[in-house]
Amino acid sequence: MRAVDIFNEAEIINRPVVEADLDSQEGKAIVSQLKQAGYRMLGKGADATVWTKDAGTVIKIIMPDLESADTAAKTFYKFYEFCQQNKGVAHLPNFVDINGKHYTTFEIGGKEFVQIAMEHLYKIKKHSFEEAMVWNLSEFASNRLSWNKALAALRAPASWEHWTAPPSVNAITRYVTTLDPQSLHEYEVLYKLMVILYHTGKINKLGWDLHTENVMQRNDGTLVIIDPWFAMNKKKHP
């Protein structure tokens, strides 16, 4: 599969990725050319924009607004490498080939940018049980709780007292208590993966950035971690 046909794609090599926030000349050129090619923006963050053209694939464009322009790309590469080393884990994203690779570069005005193609995922529904679970599991993972302790905490109303949006604390704790064994096992696998990612990030001097915008869902409801870290040498964005 080709990602952005109009771009002059090249091999990834060891040279800096150029900074291009959306208000810069290069950022505006990327947005313009993607729209002309029929892509639609799905979302944007501090470090990247995400686009789609077909039902099965999204394109992530690294566009860091950083003092060190290649920091965001290097951080995402670390996660990409982790995913490639752990293929088959249901809670990690699947990447899509672009000319035989999962990521490639393109040039605008003689400057090089990075594009990465992955499966099309969907945002977690606001104020859902899944959203509430992700927040708590992420917090427990950063505190290095065992799964048994995390599960006990999930079943205690005190763990949800900070949660002010629906569903209610009582509804959440009742739901956790009545989860079927298969669903409970899937949350256990997700949680243990979070713990591994937390420790891997610390080893690589990366900060923990796992919140509900960095976890998405497949059509079958599987929760997928898409971007768990931030670079320690830049200000963390909310």
Image: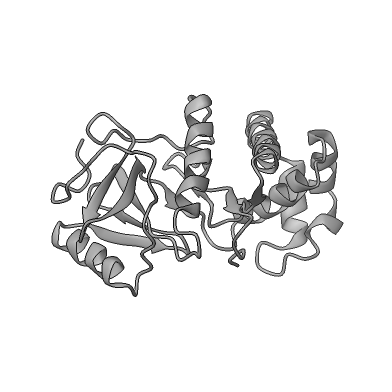
Residue 144 vs residue 134: left or right? right
Nearer to me, 55 or 65: 65
Please state if 199 lies on the left or on the right of 54 as rendered: right
**Residue at 41 percent of width and 63 percent of height:** 44
- Residue drawn 41% across and 42% down? 219
Q: Residue furthest bottom?
A: 23
Camera-side residue: 224 or 61? 61
Residue 222 visible within the image? no
> Quadrant of the rendered structure where residue 184 is?
top right
The quadrant the N terminus occupies is top left
Residue 107, percent from left and from top:
23, 53
| As drawn, 68 above or below 144 | below
Left or right relative to 188: residue 234: left
How was the colour assigned to the protein in this rendering? Answer: one colour
Image quarter of the C terminus = bottom right
Residue 196's image quarter?
A: top right
Residue drawn at (81%, 47%) of the image: 143
Residue 160 vs residue 28: left or right? right
